Image (spheres, rainbow, N blue to C red):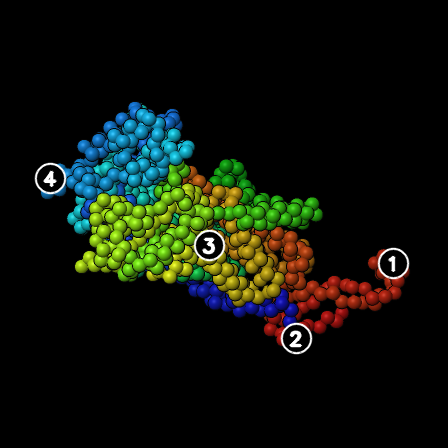
Amino acid sequence: MSFTRHYKKWEEKLGIPFEKYGVLVSRYPWHVLIGCVTINCLFGMGLLWIEIETDIETLYTLKSSPSKAERAAVKAVFTEDKSGSNFYFKNIIKEQMFAEIIVKTKDGSNILTVSYLDEIERIYNYIIDNVNITSDGTTLGFPHICALRRGNCVVEGDAIFSKAFRNALTANNINYPLFNFEYLAFTFGDVQSSGGYLTSARMIKLTFFLRQDTTAASTLSQSWEKRYIQVLAAFSSSFVDIAFATSSSIEDELEKSVTGDILYFVLTIVIMLTYAGLVTSGGDCVSDRQNLGRAGVFATCIAIFGALGLVSAVGVKFVNFVGTLPFLIIGIGLDDMFILMSCLADCSVKGTIEDRIKKTIRTGGVAITITSITDFLAFAIGASASFISVRNFCVYAGVAVFLCYINQLTFFIPCMVINERRIVRNDHCGTCHPIKPREELRMKGKSNCYIFCCGGQAPKNRKDNESPLEKYPKYLFQYIVQNPAGKIAIIVLFVAYLTATVYGVMNFKQGLLFSNLVTEDSYYYTYSKLDENHFTSEFAIGFTITSKQNYSDVTTQSRVSDLLSNARADVDINSNFRSDWLTDYKSSGIYNGDSEASFIAGLKTFLTIRTDHANDVVLSSAETSIVGARFFILTNDLPETEQKTNVMLRMREVADKSPLPVVCFSWPFIFFDEYTSVFSTTFTTVGIAIAAMFVVTVLFMPHPLLVVCVTGTMVMICAGVFGFMYYWDLALSVITMIEIIMSIGFSADFSAHICHAYITVDGATRKERVHKALDRSGGPIINAAVSSIFGIMIMAFSSSYIFKSFFKLMFLVMVLGLAHALLLLPLIFSVIGPVTELTVTNTSSGKQVYFEATSVQVDRQTNTSANKPESPGLYNVSMMVPYDLDAKDTPSTQL
C-alpha cells in the first residue's frame, strides 16, 4: 500500500470520533453551548485568588544557580550590619535598601563647576529636609533611618560636598578614580579623565543608603522610599535635570505594567470582532456568516478568561508577561475558526445539517487538533524551564491553548449548527425572521435595495458566501505558485532569507536590561536609561575565604597574593585598583607578624584607622583567630553582557584553582548566571519542542514528505526568528526566550494546515491538488495571519518593551509562517507532492472509492486519434485506478 493510501486510511480512523461528536452536537447544540459557557465562567472565578509575582530575582534568575550558592556561602561567614559603623559600599551581597538620584546638566555641558555643585548640594539638602515620614506621631527624615558609617549617614557620592573636593575642583586636580580613599567612578557619568585626574563629567549620582537591620527599620525605610519618589516627582529645577529611583522601584513599576496595557487588549477585541465580521460578510442576508465569525472571537475570549482563572485558582502566580497572552490566544482561536468555516464551505448543501457538521468536524477537527497539540506541547515543554517567569507564563499559555481548542469544539461548533439551522429555515442573518429568496422577490417587482436587505437563500457552493477577503487573496498565491516566473521568485526569496538568517544568527546578542522591564513613561525607565548608558559598568568582585586561616603564616599570605595576582592579570580586570586589607596592613607601621596573636592585635588597631576595611575581616567570638576574610578586585568598564558573563566565569576558575577555601561572588552574578543559562535553555527547549512536533506530525500525518515539510519549515522559521532578532535589535533574554517558545507552535500551524489540505483534497494532478489545497486552506491561513497581525499591531504603540518585543517576534512568525505555507510548500508539492488521488462516492453502496493516478506501459502501433503511423514500442500512459481503503493488496492495474 502506498504512503498516500496509508494516510487516507489513517485519516478515516482519526475522523471517526470527530464524526460521532458531530452527531451529538448537531442534535444538542444548545446543551453543549450552555455547558461550555458555564464551565468557562466557573473557571474564570478563580481570578478572585490571583497573585502577582514582581520580584525581579525570582522572575528572571535561575531558581538554583552557582551564584546563589556562592551568596549563601558568603552570608554564612559575613553577617552584614547594615546600620552599624562598618557599613561600606563593598557589601556586595546587595541587600541594602537605597534611594538614588542622577543630576545632569540640561545642555550636556561639564557639571564640574562651582555653580552646578551648589545646585546639587541644594537638591541634596532639599531631600534631607523634605522627604519625611510620620511614625507613631513622630516625624522622621533621612537622618533618622539612614545606614551609618562611623556614626554618619552613608551617602555614596557625598565626597563632592567636602572642602577637599572643592579645593581640588578649584585647583583642577581632582584625583580619579580614587579620591581621599573614596572611589568616584560610580559617582560621575560621561567621565573624561587625563593623567589620573578628572577633567569633566556631565552627570553626578548620589546614593542614600537606608537602615534595614530590624523589621521595624525596614518598614520605615520602605515608607521613606515611597515618600522619596513622591517628593522628587514634584521637584523641578531650571538649572539641571534629575532622574531618581529606589531599591523597590523596579518591582513597583513592574506591578503597574502588569495592568497598564488593558486598553490595548480592549482595542484588540474590537479589531478582531470587526475583522472577523468583514471576513465572513460574503453572501446574502441568509448565507451571511458575520455573527458566526464573531462567535469565534467570543469563544476565544471566554477561553482566555477561563484559563486565567483556572491557573490562578491552583496557585500559579501571575507574571507580567502573561499580559501578552490574550493577543496570542486570539490569533490561535481565529486560526481554528477560519479553518472550520472553510471546511464547512466545502460541504455539499444537499446533505442534512448533521451530515455537513460531521464532514466539517471530521476534516477541520483533525486539522485544528494537530495545530492545537503542537501549540500545547510547545508551552508544556517551556513549563519545565528553570526560570519562574518562563514556567508560569507557559502554564497559563498551555491551559489557554487547551481551553481555546475545547471551546472551538464546544462553543463554535454548536454556534455553527445553530447558524446552519437558520440557513435551512431561510431566516435573516440579523433578525432571524424568515425571508424570501432574491429571485422570488425580483419576480414580485421589489426594489434592488429591498432585495439586498431582505432577500436571500442558502449557498449552493463555496463561492456563494465567500467574502472578498476570503476569495481574492488566495488567488494571488495560486497564480504565483503556478507561474514559472513566480516559482523562480520564490526560490530567490528563500535563498535570500536563509542567507540573512545565517548572518543574523552569527551576530545576535544576549542580555536583559532592567529598563526593558518597565514602560517607557515610567520614572524608573528614565533613571535606568541614564544609569545604563552614561555610568560605568564596572563592578566589584569579592573573593571570600570561608574558613579559619592563619594569616600570619607566610604560606597563607603567599596564597592570597597569588589569588589576587591571578585575578588582576585578567584582561577585563582593573589592574590599578585593589582593595586588599592584608597588603595594606602589612604596609602599615602597625603590622606585627611574629605570631597569630600579635598579628590579630595589630590588625584590630589597623581596622580602627582604616575603617574602609572594617567590613572585610571576621574575627572569632574570642577575637583570637580570623574565621573569615574577603578581598576585592574591580572590573574594567564592561558594557556588553557577554563580557560580564565571561569575566564571571574566569574569576570562578581563578577561585577554583586556589588552594584556599575561597568563594568568588558579586551581586550581578545572580543575573549573569541567567545570561549563561538562557542560551542553552532556549536551544534545548526549542530542540525538544521540534522533536515533539516531529512525533505529533508522524502520528497525525504519517506521510514521509509531509513530516519532512512540517518539521523542515518549523526549523527554518525558528532559525529565522533567531536570525532576525539581530535586525529587530532584540537580545536573547528570558523575555525573548518566552517569545521564541511561543513561535515554535505557531511555526508549525500554517504548514500543518496546508499539508493536511493538500493530502485530503481530490485532484488528478499535483497542480490541481495544490490549487485546491490553496483554495481550501489559503483563505483561512491568510485571514488567520492577517487577523493575528492586526491584533498584535496595536502592541507596537505600547510603551512596554515586553509588548513591543512580543509584537516584533510574533509579526515575524506570522509573516514567515505565511510565506512558508503559501509559497514554499506549494512549490515543493507542485514538484514532488504525494501521488494524486480522486475520491468518488459509489451511489449504490454509499461507499467512497479512491482512484490513484498511476503510470502503465502499453504497446501501441498507431495513434488512432491523429490517424498517423506511430513508431512501435512501449509508451507510458497515466490512468486512474480504483482501490478500496480496506483492501490489503494493491489494486489491479490492468486496462
Q: Depth check: 489 or 288 in front?
A: 489
Instruction: Give the mark toward the camera: 1 or 4.
Output: 4
The residue to which callout 2 is attached is 889
Q: CA distance from mark 3 to mark 1?
A: 72 Å
Quadrant the C terminus occupies: bottom right
Q: Depth check: 219 or 707 in front?
A: 219
Residue 867 is tagged as 1
Q: Residues within 10 Å of mark 4 (few under 14, many from 20)?
A: few
Looking at this view, name the residue that lies furthest to the right: 869
Q: In the rendering, at what x and y percent does residue 312 appear?
A: 31, 56
Q: In the image, what residue type sits under mark 2?
A: Asp
- Secondary structure of the residue carrying tag 4 is strand
Which residue: 66% across, 55% down? 830
Question: Disc 4 or 2, which lies upstream in sequence?
Answer: 4
Instruction: Give the mark toward the camera: 2 or 1.
Output: 2
Q: Mark 3–mark 4 contact, CB under 8 Å? A: no
Q: In the image, what residue type sits under mark 4?
A: Thr
**In this rendering, is residue 386 above or below 301?**
below
Q: Mark 3–mark 1 contact, CB under 8 Å? A: no
Q: In the rendering, at what x and y percent does residue 877 appear?
A: 77, 63
| Drawn side of residue 508 relative to residue 81, left or right | right
Looking at this view, name the residue that lies furthest to the bottom: 888
The residue to which callout 4 is attached is 138
- Secondary structure of the residue carrying tag 1 is loop
Question: Disc 3 or 1, which lies upstream in sequence?
Answer: 3
Residue 679 is tagged as 3
Q: In the image, what residue type sits under mark 1?
A: Asn
Question: Disc 2 or 1, which lies upstream in sequence?
Answer: 1
